[in-house]
Image (spheres, rainbow, N blue to C red):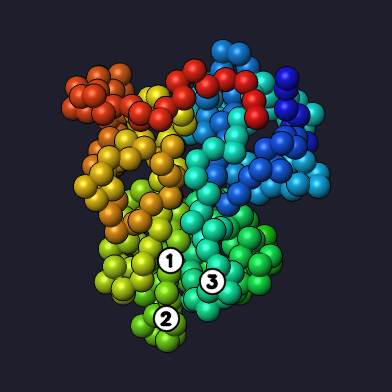
Amino acid sequence: MSFKIVSKKELANNIYLMDIEAPRVAKSAKPGQFIIIKMDEKGERIPLTIADYDIEKGTVSIVFQVVGASTKRLADYNENDSVRDFVGPLGRPSDFVEEDIEDLKKQNIIFIAGGVGAAPVYPQVKWMKEHGIDVDVIVGSKNKELLILEDEMRAVAKNLYICTDDGSYGFKGMVTAMLTDLVENQGKSYDHAIVIGPMIMMKFACILTKQLNIPTVVSLNTLMVDGTGMCGACRVSIGDEIKFACVDGPEFDGFLVNFDEAMRRQTMYKTQEGKKMLELEDGGNSHSKDCKCNIGGTK
């Protein structure tokens, strides 16, 4: 079985959006979940957050940035090409999907996206819009050229705040500076924050939201490598517990995440020596007990 690429678009330099024909995945997908794409029998598994889904068209949208050989190869695929595997939806949906809609409408919720993190934030904000819930959104990027999904986000957010590190577009400063300005200078208050982006950005966003007393959820999708609980790359400390982003998450309470440990592991996992060191450190907890090590085929 194969899955056809229905459309392909370059959102920014080396950042692509693809719509993949996968009716069963589209029918089951919920905000916060991810898929694993595999280009051919020998290809590497690539876990990617679901950026959108259309049940009527039977398509699932993915956004990815070219950062290595596998994503470079995927970027070379074009419309009407097909990939071998498209497995999902995987991971736990966002908690708010199960919450009472009327209670959500009473809350002031803000989503904060950094860089490619705008892709997983979009379906969550879209879900809110479809259920009559107004939310604010901050989207940050290094510069205007790397900003993605602005028009799509503006169509579903109550208020969209754009910021760039270099000031080339919107507010000049990082997402933390934008949030500080909203709360301290514009009189905004929030009951809940959902933050998705690079690990370092989520760390400092959580430091700020804790100071502002805004409960915060983060997505650790950036930690995932294998996406099945088998490789141990996404092992993370959440408070006093060991969790695995791909099977227990990818969303967690941002105040409980040990970001320093997670970033250290992320760096070490990039080398073979680092992987072996992590296996020794982890002992019997290197892999998730719920891992699906023989995962294959499609859903």
Q: Nearer the viewer, mark 2 or mark 3?
A: 3
Q: Nearer the viewer, mark 3 or mark 1?
A: 3
Tell me which label, 3 or 1, sits earlier in the chain: 3
Q: Tell me the CA gap for discs 2 and 3.
A: 15 Å
* Secondary structure under the numbered disc 1 in the rendered image: strand
Label 1 packing within 10 angstroms: few (<14), some (14-19), many (20+): many
Where in the figure is residue 242, as x and y percent of width and height? 27, 40
Q: Quadrant of residue 289?
A: top left
Quadrant including the C terminus: top right
* Disc number placed over residue 104 in the picture, else none: 3
Answer above or below: position of 75 versus 19: above
Q: Which residue is mark 1?
A: 193
Q: Name the one closer to the observer, 197 or 228.
A: 228
Marks 2,3: beta carbons within 8 A: no
Give amino acid for label 2. Ser
Where in the figure is residue 280, as x and y percent of width and height? 19, 22
Answer above or below: position of 259 versus 186: above
Q: Is residue 196 left or right of residue 104?
A: left
* Disc number placed over residue 189 in the picture, else none: 2
Residue 154 visible from this viewpoint: no
* Secondary structure under the numbered disc 3 in the rendered image: helix
* Secondary structure under the numbered disc 2 in the rendered image: loop
Residue at 40% over, 24% down: 230
Q: Is residue 12 left or right of residue 215?
A: right
Q: Quadrant of residue 250?
A: top left
Q: Name the one closer to the observer, 254 or 64.
A: 254
Where in the figure is residue 142, as x and y percent of width and height? 46, 55
Residue at 38% over, 63% down: 216
